[in-house]
Structure formats: structure tokens, C-alpha cells
Amino acid sequence: MAEMTYREAVVKALADELASDPDVIFFGEDVAEAGGVFKVTPGLYERFGGDRVRDTPISEQAIIGTALGAAITGLRPVAELMFADFVPVALDQIANQVAKYRYMSGGQFIVPLTIRAAQGGGNGFGTQHSQCAESWLMSFPGIKVVSPSTPVDAYGLLRGAIRENNPVFVLEHKGLYNLKGEVPDDTQPMKLGEAKVVRAGSHVTVVASQLMLHRSLEAAANLAKEGIECEVIDIRSFVPLDKATILNSLAKTNRLVIVEEAPHQAGWGGDIASLAADEGVYWLAAPVKRVNMGGALIAYSPPLEDEVLPNVGRITQAIRAVLAD
């Protein structure tokens, strides 16, 4: 078993898939000789050569359009968008072409396309480079969306995505690239669509992802000192969504807190709240609480950015409120 950073796990996953399948190719802005703007792809160009690891022009439309063409003609491309904030630049390709191509061909084509993008706040990148994209992408049927929170999941989910015959977005949180964790030597490509209970508890279910998962775990550890046991779920996959894991936990705890690095309006937490209302309402002993960014934009100013993003204090307060009802 090896300890590695989230960043190193991404590099290893890409290298292992490039090595295992000659049809896998990888391209994006500055991903070759430069090793990526976040240094997430060093060494791949030197190992696999310029035919399989390529730099592209600064054009998200060109990157996604080329990736779709490669996927439907027999390759397994992995395309990188430098920031998830740039998804709207290629929105026609993503929403109207990538997401719909297999359906519109009547299944005559598969679209084994993986798109990686760095997302998330907390690093002082400002309003236009700090957003999370899950909620945007969930609006496009035909695309799978995963968001790893740990090094082992960054490795396993990326490999699983590359082996999919449908388009998958893998959203990596740039605030976690230096996070260290164990990645067992026998870790295999992971099936998409499976959430994970990362902390067992009996008093309240907390559903979170990526940076918010780690802040939720910190809040849970603090509350455990008072005898409050939170069951913390890493959602991992937004599409497909693992409803069973969430509902099984809710049946046990009867209370639900959702922590999302997203605006309140149209945030993914609304889908989880809807799931609880539709299929778990008779288990609920208190109203569902959502902890998120409200209607605020992410500021460049560090104190303002810290104020907008959910923190341990706000998560703890929401858990206490749910337990008090």
C-alpha cells in the first residue's frame, strides 16, 4: 500500500490507463511538456510521446469537439479543461453533442469520452476560477458526473471513467491536490454510481463531497466528543446517484444535513432533499438542512471567500439545529 497525494493519484490513474490501452489518448492546454497548470500530468508526455499526450490551443470548444470526434471513431480520449469554470465556453459541444450523440445515433455509436476539470474554491483564484460544476452538468442527461474526494477515489474513479462507454466528467477539487492518503496497490477501476459511508453514526446523516466532505468530517469529529454521532456520506457520483446508500442512512438516523460548495438555487443539494421528500419522508423526524453558499459569488479576497464557503462552524450549527427539532 502506497501513500500518495490526490495529485499523484490522478497522474498514476492516467499513466496506468495509457499503458493498459493503446486507444487511450490525453490532451488539453499545457498538459504535455509543462505537466499541467496544477502539475497534475508531469511525465506523461515523456513516457507516452507526443502522439498520445498532446497540448492543444486555448480553445475549450476545439478541445471538446476534437475529443468527441476521437471517441466516436474508435479512441478513448481523456480531455482536460483547465478550470471547470470554462465548461460554459464549450457548452454547445457538451450539452448538445457529447451528451446526445449516442442517443441520436440510435446506439450505433458509443462515446467513451472522459473530460477532466479542476474546480472549487478556497485557493484565492477569484470569482471566475473557483466554481464547482456538478450542478451545471447534472442538467444534461447522457453525461455521467463524478467528484472524487480522496486520493484512492481520484485514482479509482478516473480509471473507471476512462473505461466507460459513455461520456464522463471527472471533477477534481484543486484544493485537495496536496491531500495525502493511502492507495492500496490492488486498487481497481471503480464502478461509477456508488456513494460511500466514510463515518458511521446514528444521530444524523450528513451528505457532502470533496472539500465539504473533509470539513463535514471535522465537524463530526468535534461533535462526537459531545456524544453526537454523525453518519457522513461521500456522494462521489452525482450521475448516476446512489440513492440506496443515502436512503438507508436516512432510515437509520431520521435526520439529514446536506453540505454543498454551490449556490442554494438549483444546487445539487436540492436533488438530495427531493429524494428524502419523495422516498424517505416517513423517516424524517426533522426538516432537511442545506449548508451552502446562498446566493453569493466567490470573492477574490481571502476573508470574503472564507465567509462564503461553508465552514466547520456553519456545518456544526446546522447539525445542532436538525437535532434540536
Image (cartoon, helix red, strand yellow):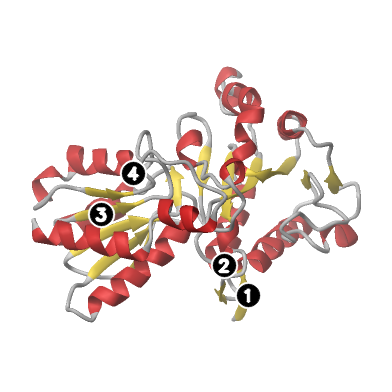
> Is 122 left, or right, of 29 in this rendering?
left
For label 1, the residue is: 4
> Is 269 left, or right, of 38 in this rendering?
left
From mark 3 to mark 4, how far is it between C-alphas? 9 Å
The label number, if any, that marks residue 229 in the structure image: none
Mark before the other along the chain sequence, 3 or 4: 3
| Residue 310 place in picture, x, y as percent | 38, 56
| Residue 8 place in picture, x, y as percent | 68, 68
Disc number lying in front (1 or 3): 3
Mark before the other along the chain sequence, 1 or 2: 1
Whether tag 1 and tag 2 are in contact, CB under 8 A, the answer is yes
> Is 68 left, or right, of 206 in this rendering?
right
The amino acid beneath tag 3 is Val
For label 2, the residue is: 151
Disc number lying in front (4 or 2): 4
The residue carrying pointer 4 sits among few (fewer than 14), some (14 to 19) or many (20 or more) residues within 10 Å by Cα, namely many
Label 4: state its secondary structure: helix
From mark 1 to mark 4, how far is it between C-alphas? 30 Å
From mark 3 to mark 2, how far is it between C-alphas? 25 Å
Mark before the other along the chain sequence, 1 or 3: 1
Q: Quadrant of residue 56?
A: top right
Name the residue nearer the viewer: 315 or 20.
315
The label number, if any, that marks residue 269 in the structure image: 4
Is residue 57 visible in the rendered image? The answer is yes
Q: Quadrant of residue 325?
A: bottom left
| Residue 261 place in picture, x, y as percent | 43, 50
Number of numbered discs on residues: 4
Residue under the point 70% across and 65% down: 12
For label 3, the residue is: 257
